[in-house]
Structures are given as structure tokens and as C-alpha cells.
Image: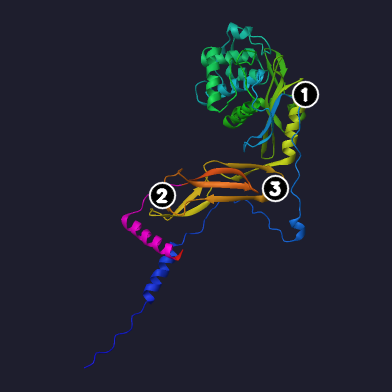
């Protein structure tokens, strides 16, 4: 008797399985992504193709020995001349004195209400003064105002002695901080800025210091905008004339000696854009104010600064293999600001450079690749891309399953 013929083999089950594996292997679309840079507009007419680039003039030329203009958030240098030249900083030195005191307060080593007993040396220090008296007690807060607003040399010495025991020991702290902040052309011999051999700084270093004053200890920065301070019955004005002339200016410090000329470190904010200018060795109080105003006006008129990505925001979600979960959130570890010429923001392009394959385990904060932002052919910045979460290695069967998925993904790719 003849057996009935067996049905022909069907491959439908295998096709379905492979299809399921292929679908499972596809990376999910990024979710909760941070706002991406606006894409460059594509010209759709001959008129659009011939539109000229925005025109930006050269930076102003100043009557000063050196100067610099930077954006406080992006760090972009918008104008400079002899910015690394070592010059006597005069009372711009007191920015470092104030910075160290603010750091000591923030670290909890001293309190702004601590009372400082005024020494004979502090009382006798010449030059600009707060007019503190020997043997009296003055709060750290008032002394800090005396330094910043009145440019008091006596207040500077009193704070230096209180923080470090002596002014010479305080100068060591100043130089240690200079190294920590990356000030390559600065060396301090005292807390006041009075002429001393080997006491110098540069416009670039002082702009960097100003940036740290503003960003590291913002709770103290409002002192720099105060126009008057009265102590011991004596009312003195802040010597920064721009505080009266430009509502956007809110600090920082003036300086003058015969050797150093007239200098000014100024900061101004319009909208979300903050600029810092440093002008060194001008001819007069009026000249330092006018030359600083030129720089600030130039920066606000011809440039824009904006936040491209926020720290911790998800820029991309990437497929990760062999992990306890399948998706890994990727972003940046700090806010990303960019400064570009006005009218050119839409020309920027951003590129994420990540490995083709990411495998667990991955720790939060681990660098995975880079983010490159360009304006035309110019690279504006390169920033590390980091994991925003920890993904532990998956179990045995999860790793086997991911190996199979990777195999089929490779076939289809």
C-alpha cells in the first residue's frame, strides 16, 4: 500500500521568525531629545541663493596697551589686542582678593558676619582707603564691600591677614588660585595691587578671573554693581563710571597707579548674553570708561549668544547591546553655549559622532563620543558626548538574544 505523499516543506515560519528578529533589532527612535540646532534653510530660489552673508566690521581700535572682549557663557573671544601682555594690574588685583574671600565664605571656612580686628599694618596701608581704624572690628561683609566698591587697600590687607594670617601668605593663595584657574600670565605679590616687583597680570587672565567671579559665586556678585558704600561716616562712590551710564553694566572693578595707568574690567548683560571686557593702561578715568563702552557696544551689536544644549538633556537615544535595557540616553555634561555673528545662527550644523555599536556595561558620565558644531567650514566647538544613565550588563539569556539580533541586523545592513 502506498503511503500518502508528505506535504512539501514550508518556510513561512522561518521567514516570520527572521522578520520578527529584524524588527526587534531596529533601534528605537530617539525620544525626549533636546532641541536640535535649527537646520540651515535650503534656498528655493535664485534670490535666496545670492543673499550676502551678514557683514561684521573689524573690532574697534582702542587707546590702551591691551584689551579683550569675551562672552562669559561661551568663552568666545570677540576682540583682543595684546591680551597676553604682562602688565601691572593695579587695583584689578583686588578681583583675586575678593574671589578668594568669596571662596572661603562659600567653603564654610569663614562667615561674612565674622568680625575682623584691624591691624596696624592694614590701618597704615596707603592709597585708596575704606578708612578703617586700628584696633576696631569690622565684618567680613563690610570689608568685602570696602574692597570692591571703595577699592580700599586697607580693607584688602585686613581680609588677607584674616584669611591667611599675613598678606604674604595670602599672596601665596592668590598664586595657587591663579594656577587653578589657568591664569598663565599672572603673578601676585600682594592683595592690593600697589606696585611691587614681579606683580603682574594680563587682560586675558583678568577676563577669565572675572568670569569665575560671576559664575562661581553669583550670590556675592551683586556687590560689584553697588554704586555707593558708606563706612565710618564716609560715603564713597564706585569708581566704575559705566554703572551710571549703561544700565546693562553690573560690575566689576577699576584700577589705577602711575605705573599701570587707568584700567577697567567691566561686565554687562543684555537678555541672555553676558559680555566681559578688560581694558588696561589707558590715559584717564574717562578714557577707560569710553574704551570699555566701545568694546561692549561692539559685542552686543554684532554677535548673538544662545544655549544650544542643556546639561543632562537627552540629545540621542542609542541602541545598546547586551544590557539590562536596550536604550541608552546620551547627552552632554554641561550647558553648551555658542556665540556667532548675528544673522548666522541658522547656518550652524551639529554632528553626533558615536560608535556604531555600544555594548553594556556603561556608567553614567562615561564618554561615548563627541558632538561637533560647525558654522560653514569652521568648527565652533567639539564637546564630549556622555552616557546620561548607567546600563548594567544583562543576564545570560539576554546577552545571547542580543547576539542573535546583532547577527541578523548585520545581515540586513
How crowded pointer 1 is (Cα within 10 Å; few <14, some 14-19, many 20+) is rated as some
The answer to which image quadrant residue 287 occupies is top right
Colour option used? rainbow
| Spot occupied by residue 402 in the image (x, y as percentages of width and height) | 38, 59
| Spot occupied by residue 27 in the image (x, y as percentages of width and height) | 47, 59
Labels 3 & 1 near each other (Cβ < 8 A): no
Which residue sits at x=55%, y=47%? 371
The answer to which image quadrant residue 213 occupies is top right
> Start and end of the magenta stretch?
389-411
Q: Earlier in the sequence, mark 1 or mark 2?
A: 1
| Spot occupied by residue 305 in the image (x, y as percentages of width and height) | 66, 41
Residue pointed to by mark 3? 344
The answer to which image quadrant residue 101 occupies is top right
Which residue sits at x=62%, y=8%? 123
Pick out the residue farthest to the bottom. 1
Residue pointed to by mark 2? 391
Element at label 2: loop
Pick out the residue farthest to the left. 1
In the image, residue 169 above or below residue 361: above
Judge whether residue 398 can be spotted in this image: yes
Q: In the image shown, does 251 or 370 lie closer to the viewer?
A: 370
Q: In the image shown, does 129 or 202 lie closer to the viewer?
A: 202
Q: Quadrant of the N terminus?
A: bottom left
State the CA–CA distance, disc 2 to disc 3: 39 Å
How crowded pointer 2 is (Cα within 10 Å; few <14, some 14-19, many 20+) is rated as many
State the CA–CA distance, disc 1 to disc 2: 59 Å
Which mark is drawn over residue 287?
1
Labels 2 & 3 near each other (Cβ < 8 A): no
Amino acid at each position: 500500500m502506498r503511503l500518502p505523499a508528505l506535504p512539501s516543506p514550508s518556510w513561512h515560519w522561518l521567514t516570520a521568525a527572521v522578520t520578527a528578529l529584524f524588527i526587534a533589532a531596529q533601534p528605537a527612535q530617539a525620544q525626549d531629545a533636546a532641541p536640535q540646532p535649527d537646520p540651515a534653510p535650503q534656498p528655493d530660489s535664485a534670490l535666496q541663493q545670492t543673499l550676502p552673508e551678514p557683514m561684521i566690521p573689524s573690532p574697534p581700535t582702542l587707546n590702551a596697551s591691551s584689551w579683550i572682549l569675551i562672552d562669559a557663557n561661551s568663552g568666545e573671544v570677540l576682540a583682543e589686542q595684546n591680551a597676553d601682555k604682562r602688565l601691572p594690574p593695579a587695583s584689578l588685583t583686588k578681583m583675586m582678593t575678593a574671589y578668594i574671600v568669596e571662596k572661603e565664605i562659600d567653603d564654610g571656612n569663614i562667615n561674612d558676619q565674622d568680625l575682623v580686628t584691624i591691624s596696624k599694618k592694614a590701618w597704615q596701608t596707603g592709597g585708596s582707603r575704606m578708612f578703617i581704624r586700628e584696633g576696631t572690628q569690622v565684618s567680613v561683609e563690610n570689608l568685602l564691600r570696602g574692597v570692591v566698591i571703595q577699592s580700599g587697600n586697607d580693607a584688602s590687607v585686613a581680609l588677607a591677614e584674616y584669611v591667611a594670617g599675613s598678606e604674604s601668605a595670602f599672596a601665596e593663595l592668590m598664586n595657587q588660585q591663579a594656577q587653578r584657574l589657568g591664569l598663565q600670565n599672572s603673578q601676585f605679590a600682594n592683595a592690593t595691587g600697589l606696585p611691587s616687583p614681579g606683580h603682574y597680570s594680563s587682560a586675558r587672565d583678568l577676563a577669565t578671573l572675572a568670569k569665575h567671579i560671576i559664575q562661581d559665586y553669583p550670590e556675592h556678585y551683586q556687590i560689584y554693581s553697588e554704586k555707593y558704600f558708606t563706612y565710618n561716616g564716609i560715603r564713597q562712590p564706585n569708581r566704575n563710571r559705566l554703572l551710571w551710564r549703561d544700565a546693562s553694566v553690573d560690575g566689576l572693578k577699576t584700577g589705577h597707579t602711575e605705573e599701570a595707568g587707568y584700567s577697567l574690567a567691566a561686565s554687562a548683560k543684555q537678555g541672555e548674553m553676558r559680555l566681559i571686557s578688560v581694558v588696561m593702561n589707558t590715559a584717564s578715568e574717562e578714557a577707560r570708561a569710553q574704551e570699555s563702552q566701545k568694546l561692549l557696544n561692539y559685542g552686543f551689536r554684532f554677535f548673538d549668544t544662545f544655549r544650544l544644549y542643556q546639561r543632562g538633556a537627552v540629545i540621542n537615544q542609542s541602541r545598546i547591546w547586551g544590557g539590562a535595557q536596550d536604550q541608552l540616553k546620551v547627552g552632554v555634561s554641561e550647558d553648551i553655549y555658542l556665540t556667532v555673528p548675528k544673522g548666522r545662527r541658522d547656518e550652524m550644523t551639529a554632528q553626533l559622532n558615536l560608535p556604531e555599536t555600544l555594548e553594556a556595561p556603561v556608567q553614567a558620565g562615561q564618554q561615548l563620543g563627541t558632538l561637533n558644531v560647525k558654522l560653514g567650514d569652521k568648527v565652533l566647538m567639539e564637546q564630549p558626548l556622555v552616557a546620561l544613565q548607567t546600563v548594567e550588563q544583562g543576564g545570560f539569556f539576554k546577552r545571547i538574544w542580543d547576539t542573535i539580533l546583532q547577527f541578523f541586523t548585520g545581515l540586513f545592513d
